[in-house]
Amino acid sequence: MAEEYDFDVIVVGGGISGSVCAYSLAKEGHEVLLIERGVEPGSKNLSGGIFYSRVMEQVFPNFTDEAPVERVITRNTLSFMNEESVVNVDYWDKRLAQPINAVSVLRAKLDPWLTEQCEDLGVTVMPGIKVDELISEDGHFVGVRAGDESLRARIVVAADGVNSFLSQYAGIRGKEPASHLGVGVKSVIRIGEEKVKERFNLSDNEGAAYAIVGDCTQGVAGGGFMYTNKDSISIGVVMMLEDLKQSGLASADIHDHFLTHPFIAPFLQDGELLEYGCHLVAEGGKAMQHDLVRNGLVVIGDAAGFTLNTGLTVRGMDLAAQSAVCASKVISSALAAEDYSQAKLEAYVSEYEQSWLGKDMETFQRAPHFLETTKEMYGDVGKLLADTFFGVYNLDLTPRKRILPVAWGAFKKSKMSMVRLVKIAINAVRAM
Ligand SMILES: Cc1cc2nc3c(=O)[nH]c(=O)nc-3n(C[C@H](O)[C@H](O)[C@H](O)COP(=O)(O)OP(=O)(O)OC[C@H]3O[C@@H](n4cnc5c(N)ncnc54)[C@H](O)[C@@H]3O)c2cc1C
């Protein structure tokens, strides 16, 4: 039987999930092939770029020292953006760097480093190859076809991202409905290391992450992000696909509108555009979870729908890594037992459900619905906050009022009813 297989495991997709899975399996002594359709690993990948990196330290013990990470995130800013005003909740905390909690990364650097680590452990890495279909025999998946080439393995891992053609091919899921998807448009703009530190008030290798709602998406459900790299800024928007369609606006125009906002433009001044890209984002949370295994097949990362946007944090890379860790454990045990059946591989589901990954998907299951349906978050709430602060700081020589009457005056100007505002507050607390 052994001669029938070219590899123990074929991993399709050289993103975070695929590389972590291939690496973890190779570490256990398995023969692994990692196939990536991008000519260079990372060339097809796009992330905003904040990696909650503790999970990586379990796989690569000196990850933040050795991997090409950009900055250590110690400042998180939540911004409510209106056309002519911005209200920030600015949180800086040295403890976020001891131990390091999150780093900014550029996938064009990180993904090649990850595949290099795989190669060092003996993984065969094949970039520039697109897998066209799965090979199925007697109800088991036993390999992949890429062009004329057929490659056989005991187990195939689908780590092929949000569109996961392999999961669709295996009949695990259909085409993802638009309500589960977002679209992201991102630029990387070089302004130089000194300017990054000056403009974001950072010392040494500290970094800042802005999560922005409101005028950045011109009222479309979603948000903007602005993250500091060593000498550049990653900046862009992520919007719910359905709401974007309904708005009739073009995602690229919204991205440009955001970058030219009077609050944002000074951060980017005299910058040089290094990268520009557009990518789908899994936004459905727990609602887009589907089966994750078949005989001889395991689905991980974005392909499995593991992303979480809570409004405060966008997480996908750490979830991708954790799903790979859980999957590799179960695959290793299946290989040892020479049992590649769905029944055996189902242990992956309980493995991830019992880990923080499953628990977080559960905890934040209301977040996608809240963010999609609470349109006030993308306009009225920001205006209410700004009007309240304007009332406090605009000393126009009329007698001053205390903050409560000022806030009440701002509220009466807004289109929201008190019942709606209370509902939004309750739903926000329950969702986040
Ligand atoms: C605009 C935007 C901002 C984001 N911001 C953040 C953030 O700040 N923090 C965060 O943690 N997450 C963020 N995410 C989510 C994060 O990028 C993903 O969750 C993460 O990349 C998932 O990793 P993955 O390995 O599962 O999939 P991917 O990184 O998408 O990798 C899939 C790989 O499979 C390859 N592939 C696909 N089909 C085939 C095939 N047929 N044959 C061979 N190879 C194939 C692709 O080329 C790709 O390299 C963001 C996403 C977007 C789009």
Image (tube, rainbow, N blue to C red):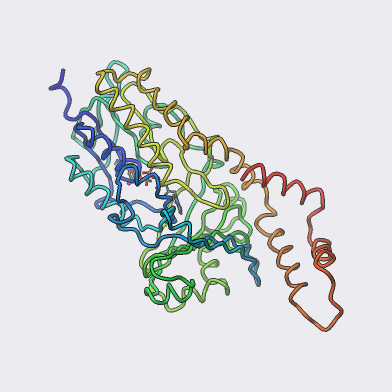
Determine the image quadrant of residue 161.
Answer: top left
Q: Is residue 137 visible?
A: yes
Give the left or right position of residue 37, taking residue 358 as reference.
left
Vertical position of residue 268 compared to residue 285: above or below: below
Q: Name the residue rendered at 15%, 22% in the picture.
A: 4
Q: Position of residue 309 (x, y in %)?
A: 53, 47
Give the camera-side residue of 101 and 122.
Answer: 101
For the N terminus, give its image quadrant: top left
Q: Name the residue rendered at 58%, 60% in the picture.
A: 78
Give the left or right position of residue 350, taking residue 239 as reference.
left
Determine the image quadrant of residue 88.
Answer: bottom right
Q: Is residue 163 visible?
A: no
Vertical position of residue 139 compared to residue 113: above or below: above
Q: Position of residue 157 (x, y in %)?
A: 31, 33
Determine the image quadrant of residue 5.
Answer: top left
For the C terminus, give its image quadrant: top right
Give the left or right position of residue 208, taking residue 169 as reference.
right
Residue extending farthest top: 138
